[in-house]
Image (cartoon, rainbow, N blue to C red):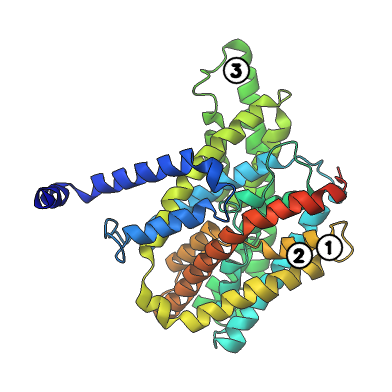
Amino acid sequence: MSRLIKSAIAMVDNYILNLLVIGILLLIVTLGSGWISRLPLSYALIYLLVGIGLGPYGVKLIELRPDAQFLERLTEFVVIVSLFSCGLKMNRPLQLWAWNSTARLIGFLMPISIFSIAAVGHFFLNLDWGVAILLGAILAPTDPVLASEVQLAHLDDRDELRFGLTSEGGLNDALSFPFVYFGIYSLKDGNWPNWFSQWVVIDIIWAVAAGIVMGILVAKAVTWIDKRLQRYRPADELMEDFIALSTILLTYSLTEVVNGYGFLAVFVSGIVVQRSYRDPEKPLSQLRFTERIEKLMEVATILLLGSLLRLKPMWAFAADSVLVAGLLFFLIRPLGAWISTIGSPLHPASRWLCGWFGIRGVGSIYYLTYAFGKGLKGELGEQIAWITFTTIVISVILHGISSTPLMNWYERRIKPKVPDLI
C-alpha cells in the first residue's frame, strides 16, 4: 500500500502538488484566522516557514530559482497595491499639524536609518560609501505589506501610533528611491561630482514633484470619469472595484513614463481617491478589494522568499547580516525614532513602539532586485543580497512574534490614556 502511495505521488507533477499545498495553506490561515490573530504569530511568519518547508531543505516541491527581474516585477506589483491601500487609509486633513508624526518619521528617522546603516556598512563591512548608502536605502524602508497588524485598522481609526506607522510605510518606500539611485550611480562612477548635480535635480526635485503631481492628476481624472459615467449607466457591481486596480496601474505607469516616482504617485493617488467620493462606501470598497489582492500576493512573495533561502551563503555572510540587522532593530531604529519624536504629542510608550515596529520585507526585496538590474553584481551583490534576505527573515521572526502581544498591550494600557489628536 505504501509503495502504491509513493508511486502515485511520484507521478503527480510538482506544479499540482504546489497548488495542493497552497490551497491547504490558504484554507488553514483563513479558517484559523480567528485563532492566529490571538497568537504571537504573523501570517508572514507562517508563509515563510511553509516556504522553507517547500524548498530544498524540506519536501523540495519548490525548486524554482527565479531571476532578479521576475522578483523585481513581482515585488513591484505587490508594493504598488499596498501603497495605494495605505493612501486610502489616510484619514487626516492635508495640513502639516495633522501629519506631525509622519513628517518626523520621514524627515528625520528615514535619513537617520539610511546613513546609520551606511556608516555600519562603511566602517564595519569595509564597503565604499556609495555601496554603503545603497545598502542603507535598501534596508531603511519599513514595509507596508507585512505590517498590517500595526497599521490603521479601519478608516475611522484615529490612533496616532497606527497612523504614523501606516503613513511612514506608505511614504518611505517611495522616498528611499533617491538614495538607491545615489548608490547605483556610485557603482558606475565613483567620482561623485560627475553626476551629483544631476542626481539632485532629476532624482530628487523632478522625480518627487512629478510623483506628487501625477498622483493627484491621474486619480482626479479617473474619479471624474467614474462619477460622470456612473450617472448614465452604473458599472457592474462585480466589476466596479477594478477601478481601484486601473487607478493603480495608470498612475504608476504614467508617472514612470515622465520619470517620476511611481511609488509616491500611487500613495498620493490613494489619498486623492479617498477624498474624491461623497459616498464613503466607495473608497471603503476599493480598500477591501486592494487589501485582498495584497494579502494574496503576500502569500506568493513570502513563500517564494522562504524557498529561496540557502544555508551556505547565509552562513557565509552571517556575521555581516547579524551585525547589520542587530544594530538596525535594537539600536538604529529605536534610537532614531526616539530622537525623531522629541517634542511630539506621542506617548513615551508609543515612541518606543514606533521604534520597534520597523518591519522590513517586500519593499527591500524590490530595491535589491532593482539594484541588480542596474549594475549591482558579483561578490558585492551576493553580500548585499544575503544581508538583505537575512535581515528580512530576522524581521519576519522578531516582529511576527512580538507584534500581536505588543499591540494588544498597547490597546489595553496605553491607547485609552492618549486622546485622539484629530
Q: Which mark is residue 104?
A: none
The residue beneath circle 3 is 229
Query: In 3D space, how far apart are the residues under numbered discs 1 and 3 (Cα atoms)?
Result: 50 Å
Q: Is residue 324 visible?
A: yes
Under circle 2, the secondary element is helix
Point 54% across, 84% down: residue:
127
Precedes in sequence: disc 2 or disc 3: 3
Question: Could you tell whether 233 is left or right of 279 in the image?
Answer: left
Under circle 3, the secondary element is helix
Q: Answer with the quarter of the image where residue 142 lies.
A: bottom right
Position in image of residue 220 (x %, y %) = 67, 33
In the rendered image, the vertical position of residue 242 relative to residue 55, given as above or below: above
In the rendered image, the vertical position of residue 238 relative to residue 345, given as above or below: above
Q: Nearer the viewer, residue 328 or 1?
A: 1
Precedes in sequence: disc 1 or disc 3: 3
Position in image of residue 309 (x %, y %) = 39, 67
Disc 1 marks a residue whose amino acid type is Pro
Disc 3 marks a residue whose amino acid type is Leu
Which one is in front in this view, the residue at disc 1 or the one at disc 3? 1
Q: Which quadrant: the C terminus?
A: top right
Point 50% across, 54% down: residue:
44
Q: Which mark is residue 348?
A: 1
Q: Is residue 214 visible?
A: no
Disc 2 marks a residue whose amino acid type is Trp
User: Would you say the residues marked 2 and 1 are in contact, meaning their CB atoms lie under 8 Å apart?
Assistant: yes
The residue furthest top is 232
The residue beneath circle 2 is 352
Point 44% across, 49% down: residue:
299
Point 79% across, 53% down: residue:
413
Q: Nearer the viewer, residue 119 or 186?
A: 119
